[in-house]
Image: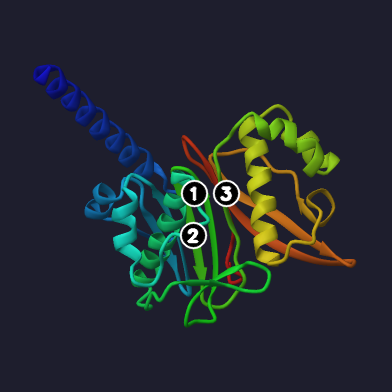
Amino acid sequence: MVAVAGAGQRVYAVRVARERMQFLNFYFQRTSINFPKVLTFEKLFRMPLEKIVQEPGRAWALWRISETESELSARVLPYETAPDTLVHPNKRLEFLAGRALVRSIMEEMKLSFQGISKDEFGKPYPKGYDHHLSLSHSYPYVGALLDLNQAVGIDLEQPKDKLFRIAPRVFAPEELHDAGTSLTKHCIYWCAKEALLKVYGKKDLIFSENLLISPFREEKEGEIHGRIIVNDRVSMIPLHYIVYPNFVVVFNQSEKI
């Protein structure tokens, strides 16, 4: 039995090492995004998928959860603890990982992490600052975007067949036609609409009427144009999307771009 357990551990170690190398190869092949990147081997192997991308006045990041709840809790104490109302283990991990990720971003930006609060509409912001924050998670992945000056929205989702069932209710006819039969493109549309909703910061919008995405060509990474329409007022929101092997992430770009 001991020999079998030892062999299993070796197989697991080899698989983890292979996954990490695959991520390294995938990550460093990406050259089209026009942002400076900050990623160290120390961070990568401590946090299996942490990526912090910075530009003046903002930063966004990704994290693949592999830590235990106690390990994540230690990262955010004494400022944050998982609420008792969160019962599901994965939801508790998402909560803590999101805050740990925000702390990493703020430390990169030379800001002091003091926890996260929410405004009257439920939109998060870093305690002690007037900066803008957006969080997203789809276990085991977590994303966060922090901007010093402008409203932000980031959304991360894993492509799943349920998007085909949801799309007719939340996509405009033009969007539904453009998405076609591509699950990835459906996921991009969905994430883009969620990102727009987070930029708006309130909940009283209809996805198929108030949050619209212009048709686009599906690539591994690209820009798309979003519109928030409220009371005949149209706000144009430039968005950026990236398709990773297991998930899609979409976020609004800086107004300076």
Q: Secondary structure at mark 1?
A: loop
Badge nearest the viewer, 2 or 1: 1
User: Do the CB atoms of the residues marked 2 and 3 lie less than 8 Å apart?
Assistant: no
Marks 2, 3: nearer the viewer: 2
Q: Position of residue 252 (x, y in %)?
A: 61, 60
Q: Residue 36, can we see it? A: no
The residue depicted at 71 percent of the width and 31 percent of the height is 164
Q: Quadrant of the N terminus?
A: top left
Please say which color scheme the image uses: rainbow
Residue at horizontal 36%, vertical 47%?
49
Residue shown at the point (31%, 45%) measured from the top left? 48
Residue 3: quadrant of the picture:
top left
Residue assigned mark 3: 241
The extreme left residue here reads: 3
Percent across and percent down for residue 220 are 53, 39
On screen, residue 151 above or below 191: below
